[in-house]
């Protein structure tokens, strides 16, 4: 692999060096015995996660939510009518502990966005369901979220977005992110 960074979309010369180019060049100068070709793409993914995450989080913050709150509501909404899951199913889907899920559910319930209901098939368990207010909020938020994500990727062409998606899917599978929820 001989990747050196920059814009490789076929639109001409690479843009001026970014912070990652500078860091990789410094490492190459200090440790020419190492192959730093993987550092650039992975550092850019990390930086994109930070900077892109801030832009994504702004949409949620406008409604007084954070990303985890959004993901709980979205997980319930995606499950389809009647928009109910067990706390364990939610925790597994969000890769979080059941204890932190309980606290989050308490907060969302306090805002009238979710409700706890008895589980019809298991008296020892309960379900978390979206309220009408919760459905309305998540439907509005997901529309704004999708528009925001589309805007963030609008600098890429359709083929580039598809390629990026394939590459990221391959990388996530390689680090153990399976076909879970």
Image: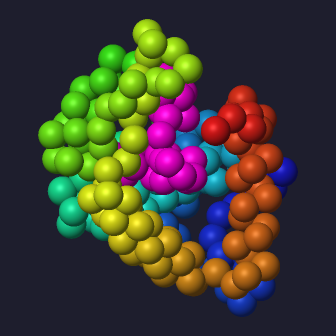
- Tell me which colouring the rendered structure shows: rainbow
The answer to which of 14 and 165 lies nearer the viewer is 165
Which SS type dominates the magenta stretch? helix
Q: Please state which of residues 27 and 65 is positioned toward the viewer in this rendering.
A: 65
Q: Nearer the viewer, residue 176 or 181?
A: 181
Q: Is residue 172 left or right of residue 135?
A: right
Q: Residue at x 54, y 52 (%)?
A: 81
Q: Position of residue 47 (x, y in %)?
A: 46, 54
User: Taking 154 as reference, is 176 above or below it?
Assistant: above
Locate residue 36, reporting x and y percent: 67, 44
Q: Residue at x 65, y 76 (%)?
A: 7
Is residue 43 in view? no
Q: Position of residue 32 (x, y in %)?
A: 67, 41
* Residue reaching furthest to the bottom: 12
Residue 179: quarter of image: top right
Q: Is residue 79 magenta?
A: yes
Dividing the picture into quadrants, the one containing residue 93 is top right
Find the residue positioned furthest to the top: 124
Which residue is drawn at the image coordinates 48% and 53% (left, top)?
A: 77
- The C terminus lies in which quarter of the figure? top right
Residue depicted at x 72% and y 61%: 165
Q: Tell which of 155 and 96 is nearer to you.
A: 96
Task: Please say if 136 is above or below 123.
Answer: below
Q: Is residue 80 magenta?
A: yes
Report the span colored magenta. Answer: 69-93
């Amino acid at each position: 692999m001989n990747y050196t960074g920059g814009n490789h979309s076929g639109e001409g010369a690479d843009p001026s060096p970014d912070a990652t180019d500078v860091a990789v060049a410094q490492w190459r100068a200090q440790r020419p015995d190492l192959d730093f070709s993987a550092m650039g793409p992975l550092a850019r993914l990390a930086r994109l996660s930070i900077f892109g995450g801030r832009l994504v989080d702004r949409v949620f913050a406008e409604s007084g939510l954070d990303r985890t709150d959004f993901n709980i509501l979205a997980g319930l909404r995606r499950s389809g009518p009647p928009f109910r899951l067990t706390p364990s199913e939610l925790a597994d889907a969000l890769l979080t502990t059941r204890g932190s899920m309980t606290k989050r559910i308490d907060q969302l319930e306090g805002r009238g966005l979710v409700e706890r209901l008895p589980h019809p098939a298991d008296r020892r368990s309960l379900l978390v369901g979206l309220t009408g207010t919760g459905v309305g909020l998540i439907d509005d938020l997901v529309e704004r979220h999708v528009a925001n994500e589309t805007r963030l990727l609008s600098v890429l062409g359709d083929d580039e977005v598809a390629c990026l998606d394939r590459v990221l899917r391959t990388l996530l599978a390689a680090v153990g992110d399976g076909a879970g929820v």
